[in-house]
Image (tube, helix red, strand yellow):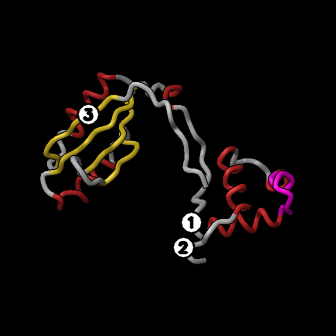
């Protein structure tokens, strides 16, 4: 299936419903959308093959697991050629939950979750800032996350 698969209104409705509840039975979704369960199945499979649907997952609440500190760390590398090795070292750290290779002030911008400020300090001093390829870091602590949503199909 081509990577440039274009979704139509039915695909959008299917994606919207699955993003709200990935466990909704195809038969129930078919009733809601006034199509057959087979149509839902075929459409979902086509979107999987096109890479639009990458899988399903359980979403957990980090705070309920004790992760009370969310921060963003901007990283300046010593050299652009250091990116692959720095990324590999950062990827090995459980506290790093997202990372982006960016333009602008930072080479890498990442999201880090820890259980406390003390743990964040330990991660910064003993893990992140000991990576040879990193020239400097800037840490921004998140106070709240008032907007959290997926893109609309």
Q: Are marks 1 and 2 in contact (CB under 8 Å)?
A: yes
Q: Which residue is mark 1?
A: 51
Q: Are marks 2 and 3 in contact (CB under 8 Å)?
A: no
Labels 2 and 3: the sequence-earlier one: 2
Q: Is residue 122 above or below residue 72?
A: above
Horizontal and vertical percent position of residue 98: 39, 45
x and y percentages locating residue 124 in the rendered image: 24, 34
Q: In 3D space, how far apart are the residues under numbered discs 2 and 3 (Cα atoms)?
A: 37 Å
Residue 110 on image: x %, y %: 33, 43
Query: Can you identify the residue that label 3 sits on?
Result: 139
- Residue extending farthest front: 9
Label 1 residue SS: loop
How far is mark 1 from mark 3, CA to CA? 34 Å
Image: 139 above or below 39: above
Q: Is residue 32 shown in magenta?
A: yes
The rendered magenta stretch, by its main secondary structure, is classed as helix
User: Marks 1 and 2, how far apart in space?
Assistant: 7 Å
Quadrant of residue 135 within the rendered picture: top left
Q: Earlier in the sequence, mark 1 or mark 2?
A: 2
Q: Residue at x 18, y 59 (%)?
A: 80
The part of the chain drawn in magenta is 29-37
Give the vertical position of 145 relative to 50 (above or below): above
- Quarter of the image for residue 9 reads bottom right
**Which mark is drawn over residue 3?**
2
Total tally of numbered discs in the picture: 3
Q: Looking at the image, which residue is at 30% across and 45% down? A: 109
Q: Earlier in the sequence, mark 1 or mark 3?
A: 1
- Whether residue 151 is in magenta: the answer is no
Q: In percent of the image, x 34 and y 51: which residue is there?
A: 100
Q: Give the foreground label among 1 and 2.
A: 2
Look at the image and tell me in which quarter the N terminus lies.
bottom right
Question: Residue 76: where, in percent of width, then height?
Answer: 18, 47
């Amino acid at each position: 299936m081509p990577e440039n698969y274009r979704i139509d209104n039915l695909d959008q409705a299917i994606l919207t419903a699955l993003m709200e509840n990935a466990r909704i039975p195809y038969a129930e979704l078919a009733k809601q959308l006034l199509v057959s369960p087979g149509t839902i199945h075929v459409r979902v499979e086509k979107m999987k093959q096109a890479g639009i649907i990458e899988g399903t997952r359980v979403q957990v609440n980090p705070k309920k697991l004790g992760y009370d500190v969310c921060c963003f760390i901007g990283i300046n590398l010593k050299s652009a050629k250091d990116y692959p090795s720095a990324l590999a070292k950062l990827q090995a750290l459980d506290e790093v939950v997202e990372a982006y290779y960016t333009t602008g002030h930072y080479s890498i911008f990442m999201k880090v979750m820890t259980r406390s400020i003390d743990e964040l300090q330990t991660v910064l001093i003993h893990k992140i800032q000991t990576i040879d390829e990193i020239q400097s870091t800037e840490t921004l602590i998140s106070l709240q996350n008032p907007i959290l949503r997926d893109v609309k199909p």
